Image (spheres, helix red, strand yellow):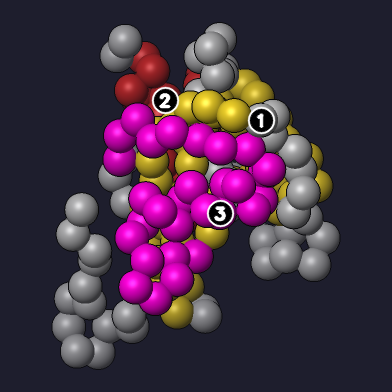
Amino acid sequence: MPLPTSATSNSPTPLLVVCAVIENEDGQILSAQRGPGMSLAGKWEFPGGKVEPGEEPAAALIREIQEELGCTVSIINPLTPSNLIHGRGALCLIPFSCKIVAGTPAANEHSALHWSAPEYLLELDWAPADLPIVAEVIQLASSR
């Protein structure tokens, strides 16, 4: 997957972050609530984290989910990246649809974890960068 580049020399280089859209056997999607002390505390997000220099996004996702949730995921396919420019710079959120292949997710770094059917995802208060991904997840689920 090609990584995003700046549109102009004046555009900030985006921070690359991966996230997992984890679906269980009942078709529910896992959401994670950002904990106190985190930026956007209380907002919901798809779990994941920063891509380290030289790291491939897929490898970063598997590492981050193991660190954050204590479980292992298998990547099913990439979804559409979400780009956001905010007060601290630019962010490119790279999502992958996944399934759990080992372990049970635990809220090691988050306040809470929540499973919900795709049609109920918008009932949560999402972090801005995750909203386009939520919309894609809902659209994909409704087209099945």
Labelled disc at residue 64: 3
**Seen in the image, is 112 located left or right of residue 131?**
right
Labelled disc at residue 103: 1
**Which residue appears at 59% of the width and 29% of the height?**
102
Where does residue 103 sit, x and y in percent of width and height?
Answer: 66, 30
Kindly report the distance in space between the C-alpha atoms of the residues bearing marks 3 and 2: 24 Å
Where does residue 120 sit, x and y in percent of width and height?
Answer: 58, 22
Residue 64 forms part of the magenta stretch = yes
Kindly report the distance in space between the C-alpha atoms of the residues bearing marks 2 and 1: 26 Å
Q: Is residue 53 above or below residue 38?
A: below
> Is residue 136 in view from this perspective?
no
- Residue interval drawn in magenta: 50-78
Mark 3 is on which residue type? Glu
Please name which of the two marks, 2 or 1, marks the residue nearer to the observer: 1
Labelled disc at residue 138: 2
**Which residue appears at 74% of the width and 54% of the height?**
109
- Classed neighbour count for the residue bearing mark 3: other residues with Cα under 10 Å, few (<14), some (14–19), many (≥20): many
Q: Nearer the viewer, residue 127 or 18?
A: 18
**Which residue appears at 76% of the width and 43% of the height?**
107
**Mark closer to the chain start, 2 or 1:** 1
